[in-house]
Amino acid sequence: MSPPPDSKQTAAETAETSTTRSRPRTALDNQNFIKKQVKSLILTGDLGPGDPLPTEQQLMNQLGVGRHPLREAMKALEAVGIVEIRHGHGTYVGTLSLRSLEDGLAFRMTQSMAGDLRDVRDVLDVREALEVGLADQVIAHYRGTGYERLAEIVDTMEQMAARGQTFAEQDLDFHRTLYAPLDNRLIIDLLSVFWRTFAEVNERLPGDHYTPADAARWHRNLLEAIKKNSAADFTRAMKDHFTGIRVRFDATET
């Protein structure tokens, strides 16, 4: 008796497709139809990140669509991280990507620079809510120990501040290191998106309404709260951090 076929491949090859009676009528409808069918194929086939999808020709046959609309739909799915197109090798199930979110936020925040900075403030509010909300988890993890890498980063910040240097790279490194032990990749990715989009706008603001020494002090206070194993102190230090950042926006508008 021959061995049973691979379950993932079988599911992919036998994924249900709509009949000609339900075919979309417009190009946009067609693209949405294809995207829906490809996502259904991934889900019903129990395919995970990195698993290969059927070939382009196989998908054309299964879905009853042409090459051009299929490629356009695949590009749209790739833009949101659902699939990954490896030219010359095929198409694979993608991994979570926040690239489209980052691009959209960056554009809106750049637009906001010419107005009332509303979108910039909104992003800052969301980031603060997320980081303050993680205080209990952070303190519960560290329990007053295991903060050596954070201490090294803060020491570097203070040394650079003493020389009048800014430390954007160390700032991002601190926040990534701070939350890495929580073992939640989405938290790291979201904070990185917020941080990068904000940092780009922050560099364009006129004037310096807080100094590198101020920024180093904010991070030192966060570190001291971890050392003391105090969620209350950590929350207070994080709020002070964001209050200090907002001072720059308030000064820009005056």
Image (tube, grey):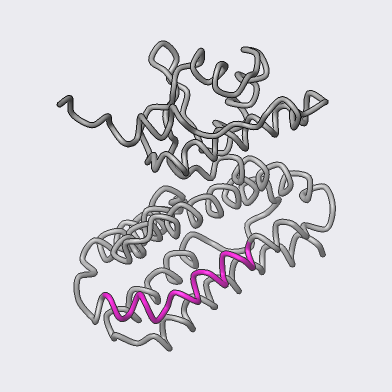
Q: Position of residue 252 (x, y in %)?
A: 75, 59
Of residues 33 and 6, the one nearer the viewer is 6
- Residue at left offset 48%, top offset 59%: 212
- Say which quadrant the C terminus sits in: bottom right
Seen in the image, is 226 located left or right of residue 55?
A: left
Closer-to-camera residue (60/197): 60
Determine which quarter of the picture holds residue 29.
Answer: top right
Q: Is residue 91 left or right of residue 180?
A: right
Give the side of residue 204 with respect to residue 184, left or right: right
| Residue displayed at 56% across by 70% down | 128
Relative vertical location of residue 151 with respect to residue 195 in this rendering, above or below: below
Magenta span: 124-141
Does residue 161 show up magenta in the picture?
no
Is 68 or 221 nearer to us in this picture?
Answer: 68
> Which of 176/47 is in front?
47
Magenta: main secondary structure: helix
Residue 248 percent coordinates (x, y): 67, 63
In reply to whether residue 128 is colored magenta, the answer given is yes
The answer to whether residue 194 is left or right of residue 53 is right
Q: Position of residue 167 (x, y in %)?
A: 43, 51
